[in-house]
Amino acid sequence: MGKKYDVVVIGAGNGGLMAATKSALAGKKTLLIERHNIPGGSATSFVRGRFEFEASLHELCGIGPYIEGGRELKKIFDELGISEKIEWVTLYEAFRMITLNDKENVDYTLPTTRKAFIDKVEEYCPGSREKCEKLFDIIEEANAGLDYLGTIQNFSTDIFKKIFGEYSDFINCAGYTVNELFDALDLPKAALFHDV
Ligand SMILES: Cc1cc2nc3c(=O)[nH]c(=O)nc-3n(C[C@H](O)[C@H](O)[C@H](O)COP(=O)(O)OP(=O)(O)OC[C@H]3O[C@@H](n4cnc5c(N)ncnc54)[C@H](O)[C@@H]3O)c2cc1C
C-alpha cells in the first residue's frame, strides 16, 4: 500500500494539535485524527442553557505580564506566530473558593503571584508561610526542570548530571502525588482549604 502520510497524529487535544502543527510546519504530510466532533480535547468548552463551561483547562500559567523573559509555553505561542493574534485576558486572582459547611461558610480569594498568594494563605491560615514557601520552591523548581527537559535535543551524561544536580527536588517529587507532597511538607489542612 502506498504511503499517504509522513505522520499520523491521533487525538486533537493540545498535545496532538501541537504535534501535528509542528510536523506540518516541518514540511511533513500530516494527518490529525480526532474522534470528537470538535478539536481541543480537554481544552474545549460546552454550552448548557445560558452558561458556557470549560471541560477542564481554564487558564494558562507562564504567559502573563508577571513572567519575566517568558517561559517555554509563551515561547511556543511565539514560535507559532500566534501570540499577538490571541486576545489574552489577565487573571489577577488565581482562584476563588466558596465552601459551605457546618462550622463556617468561607469565601476565599487567592491572588496571583507567589508573594501575594503566600501572604494571603498566611492571613487565612497563620503559621503556614514557611511550608508554603517550601511548596512554591518545589513548584518553581519543577517548572524550571520541565522547561529544561523541553529544551533537550539529544540526551547525554551531562544532561543527567544537570537534571539530578540542579533539579533534585523536582526529581525527588516526581513519583509523588500532589496530596502525598502536601502531606510530606506537613502543610496545615486549613492552608489547603480542606478543613475549613
Ligand atoms: C479538571 C482539569 C482542569 C485543568 N485545568 C488546567 C488549567 O487551568 N490550565 C492548564 O494549563 N491545564 C489544565 N489542565 C490540564 C490540561 O487541560 C491538559 O493537560 C491538556 O488539555 C491535555 O491535552 P492532551 O492533548 O494531552 O489530552 P486531551 O485534551 O485529553 O486530548 C486527547 C484527545 O484525543 C482524542 N482521542 C482519544 N482517543 C482517540 C482515538 N482513539 N481516536 C481519535 N481521537 C482520540 C480525544 O477525544 C481528545 O480530543 C486541566 C485538566 C483537568 C482535568
Image (cartoon, rainbow, N blue to C red):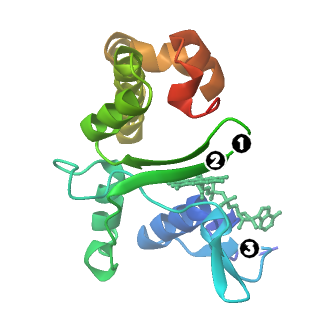
Q: Quadrant of the N terminus?
A: bottom right
Q: Which mark is residue 115?
A: none
User: Of helix, strand and loop, which one carries label 1?
Assistant: loop
The quarter of the image that holds ligand 1 is bottom right
> Quick check: can you spot residue 3?
yes
> Image point 71% across, 72% down: which residue?
3
**Callout 3 environment at 10 Å: few (<14), some (14 to 19), or many (20+)?**
some
Chain-order first, disc 2 or disc 3: 3
Q: Which mark is residue 101?
A: 1
Q: Nearer the viewer, mark 3 or mark 1?
A: 1
> What's the distance in space between the residues labelled 3 and 1, CA to CA?
42 Å
| Residue nearest the observer in this picture, 65 or 147 | 65
Image-based side of 85 in relation to 96, left or right: left
- The residue singled out by tag 3 in the image is 34
Q: Which mark is residue 99?
A: 2
Kindly indicate whether the residue at mark 2 contacts the one at mark 1 (C-beta within 8 angstroms): yes
At label 3, the amino acid type is Glu
> Quick check: can you spot residue 177?
no
**Callout 2 environment at 10 Å: few (<14), some (14 to 19), or many (20+)?**
some
> Image point 41% across, 19% down: which residue?
128
Residue at the far front: name it: 103
> What's the distance in space between the residues labelled 1 and 2, CA to CA?
6 Å
Q: Is residue 64 above or below residue 135?
A: below
Q: Is residue 153 above or below residue 86?
A: above
User: Of helix, strand and loop, which one carries label 3?
Assistant: loop
Image-quadrant location for residue 37? bottom right
At label 2, the amino acid type is Thr
| Residue nearest the observer in this picture, 113 or 68 | 113
